[in-house]
Image: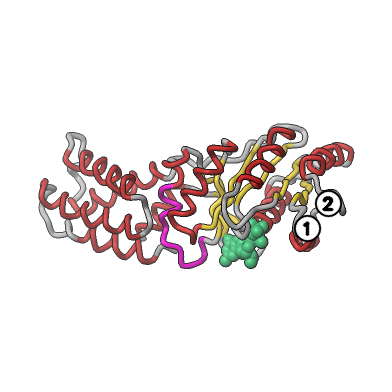
């Protein structure tokens, strides 16, 4: 994960090794390389610049920990700032409501259906919940089928209505069904498109206002770099979602989405997807991710 970024940050931070003290010159030189590494990893230039400005102020400021050597100090400052940029603390799901309703949004192929299954499995095994998966991708029979296959794999019931092309109605019926059958979490998988379009946005916004979910999650493929951030912005403008799910972090992703999405939409990354299997799901901890990035 983020191998390229990790290597570049490592060599940037190496510049200070062997220096006896922090100076304007060696800090500037180091942070120029840090900025370059971030931009190469698809972090937006403005965010990368703000990042290095903050680190510079801290490095040259009054409160530097003089016990640390310059190299160690800079590693610490970069790690702390990366953690902050990615949200600081881990944020869990709001599982209030009987049932708690979780609405999944995102583009086609982002990993919504897979993640819906992973989340149902996670809630079932870790939180002893009784989830219901709901198939609202009414345009693609294959998508409904895919969710059913996932449901069978993890032994979670899937609600679908053959022939009903109204996802708002289906989700409302699913809520009634969940209440009658003792499901305390409802996860609604919706239709995505290949790119942001008005019909998709209207549809998901309609489902959102009809069922008022406790959690609206935006699923995004981390391999899509700056596009991931732009898509997040478009969905957030419309849905004001509660959290981000970053998928495919097991692939050769550069890291820009993980680092910058929080500061662009001001919503936390709540989980990451790290594979195709149903157990390839992790809670997102900003500090652990910063540790991984810095190796
Ligand atoms: P949807 O169209 O948004 O519902 O996306 P899918 O759930 O169908 O996922 C699209 C493809 O990405 C499928 O082949 C999934 O197996 C794959 N996929 C989903 N999440 C991950 C992940 O975290 N890692 C990897 N490597 N593949 C994933």
Give the camera-side residue of 261 and 185.
Answer: 261
Asked whether 14 or 256 is in front, the reply is 256
The C terminus is located in which quarter? Answer: bottom left
**Residue 279 at least partly seen:** no
Do tag 2 and tag 1 residues touch (Cβ < 8 Å)? yes
Q: Is residue 253 magenta?
A: yes
Numbered badge on residue 144: 1
Q: Quadrant of the N terminus?
A: bottom left
**Res. 226 visible in picture:** yes
The number of numbered badges drawn on the structure is 2
Quadrant position of residue 253: bottom left
Residue 126 % position (x, y): 68, 49
User: Which tag, 2 or 1, sits closer to the chain's start?
Assistant: 1
Q: Is residue 117 left or right of residue 289?
A: right
Image spot of residue 152 (x, y percent): 80, 61
Label 1 residue SS? helix
Residue 250 position in % (x across, y down): 52, 65
For the point 85% across and 49% down, which residue is it?
164
Say which residue appears at 57% left-offset and 54% top-offset.
195
**Label 2, label 1: how far apart the Cα atoms are:** 7 Å
Looking at the image, which residue is at 65% across and 53% down? 192
Q: Can you tell which quarter of the image residue 4 is in? A: bottom left
Q: Which residues are magenta?
A: 249-260
| Residue 281 belongs to magenta span | no
Identify the residue position indicated by label 2 in the image. 160
Residue 38 in the image: state x and y as whole percent. 32, 55
- Badge 2 crowding class, 10 Å Cα cut-off, few under 14, some 14 to 19, many 20 or more, is many
């Amino acid at each position: 994960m983020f191998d390229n970024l990790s290597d570049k940050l490592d060599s940037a931070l190496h510049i200070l090794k062997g220096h006896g003290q922090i100076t304007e010159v060696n800090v500037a030189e180091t942070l120029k390389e840090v900025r370059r590494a971030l931009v190469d990893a698809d972090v937006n230039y403005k965010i990368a610049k703000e990042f290095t400005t903050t680190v510079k102020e801290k490095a040259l400021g009054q409160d530097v920990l003089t016990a640390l050597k310059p190299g160690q100090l800079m590693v610490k400052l970069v790690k702390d700032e990366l953690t902050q940029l990615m949200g600081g603390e881990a944020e869990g799901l709001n599982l209030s409501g009987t049932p708690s309703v979780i609405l999944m949004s995102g583009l086609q192929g982002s990993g919504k259906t897979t993640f819906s299954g992973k989340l149902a499995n996670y809630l079932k095994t870790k939180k002893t919940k009784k989830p219901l998966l709901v198939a609202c991708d009414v345009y693609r029979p294959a998508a409904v089928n895919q969710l059913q296959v996932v449901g069978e794999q993890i032994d979670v019931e899937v609600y679908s209505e053959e022939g009903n092309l109204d996802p708002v109605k289906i989700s409302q019926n699913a809520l009634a069904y969940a209440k009658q059958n003792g499901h305390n979490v409802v996860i609604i998988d919706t239709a995505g498109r290949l790119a942001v379009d008005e019909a998709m946005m209207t549809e998901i916004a309609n489902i959102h206002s009809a069922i008022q979910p406790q959690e609206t999650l935006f699923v995004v493929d981390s391999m899509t770099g700056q596009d991931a951030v732009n898509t997040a912005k478009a969905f957030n403008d419309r849905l004001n979602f509660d959290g981000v799910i970053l998928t495919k972090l097991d692939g050769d992703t550069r890291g820009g989405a993980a680092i910058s999405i929080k500061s662009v939409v001001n919503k936390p990354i709540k989980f990451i997807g790290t594979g195709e299997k149903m157990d390839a799901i992790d809670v997102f901890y900003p500090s652990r991710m910063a540790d991984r990035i810095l190796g």
